[in-house]
Structures are given as structure tokens and as C-alpha cells.
Image (cartoon, rainbow, N blue to C red):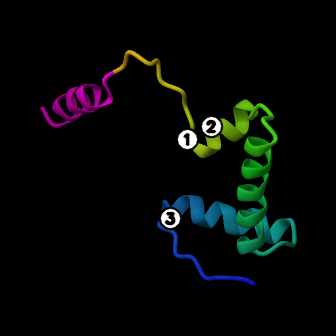
Amino acid sequence: MDKKLTLSLNESVIEDAKSYAKKNQISLSKLIETYLKSIIDNTTKNVAITPLVESLSGVIELPKDVDVREEYTKYLIEKYQ
């Protein structure tokens, strides 16, 4: 049973994904579904995620001693100074 999902993505990413899907004769919905399923399957099978997939999904592992809130605060201060 299919269910509708609304995503907010960068406009250029959407356009590039549409072009890729068209070139590969697949719907954008099916492309995203396949991508998400591959991540889920790899995670549940305990298979290492390739660096490419990791970079696409934005997944990074932070060191345990990093205070994320503090680092984000520093980032915002630098960004808006």
C-alpha cells in the first residue's frame, strides 16, 4: 500500500534528481523509495554504508566527547558575526 509523503529539499537537488530519474527511466518516487530501502536494508543487515551513500545521506559519526549543542552555538556565533 503506497502512502503519500511530502519532503522539503534544495531546489537544485530536486531538479538534478528529476533529470537522473528521467535519464534512467524511473519515477522520482521509485528512485527515492529504492534509495531509502537500500539504506534500511544495509542497516538491518549490519552492512557497512559506503562513503558515497554516507555523504549523500549526511550521516556522520561524531566523537562521543563532542558537545553538539556547544559546537552548534559556536558555529552560529561565527556565522552571524
Look at the numbered discs 3 and 1 and tell me whether their residues touch, using CB distance below 8 Å.
no
Look at the numbered discs 1 and 2 and tell me whether their residues touch, using CB distance below 8 Å.
yes
Q: Of helix, strand and loop, which one carries label 2? A: helix
Q: Amino acid at mark 2?
A: Ser
Find residue 49 and report its horizontal and vertical position in percent.
74, 35
Horizontal side, residue 63 vs residue 65: left or right: right
Q: Quadrant location of residue 65?
A: top left
Q: Disc number at residue 55?
A: 2
C-alpha gap between disc 1 and disc 2: 5 Å
Q: Of helix, strand and loop, which one carries label 3? A: helix
Q: Of helix, strand and loop, which one carries label 1? A: loop
Q: Amino acid at mark 3?
A: Glu
Q: Residue at x 72, y 36 (%)?
A: 52
Q: Earlier in the sequence, mark 3 or mark 2?
A: 3
Q: Which residue is mark 1?
A: 58
The N terminus, quarter of image: bottom right
Q: Which residue is mark 3?
A: 11
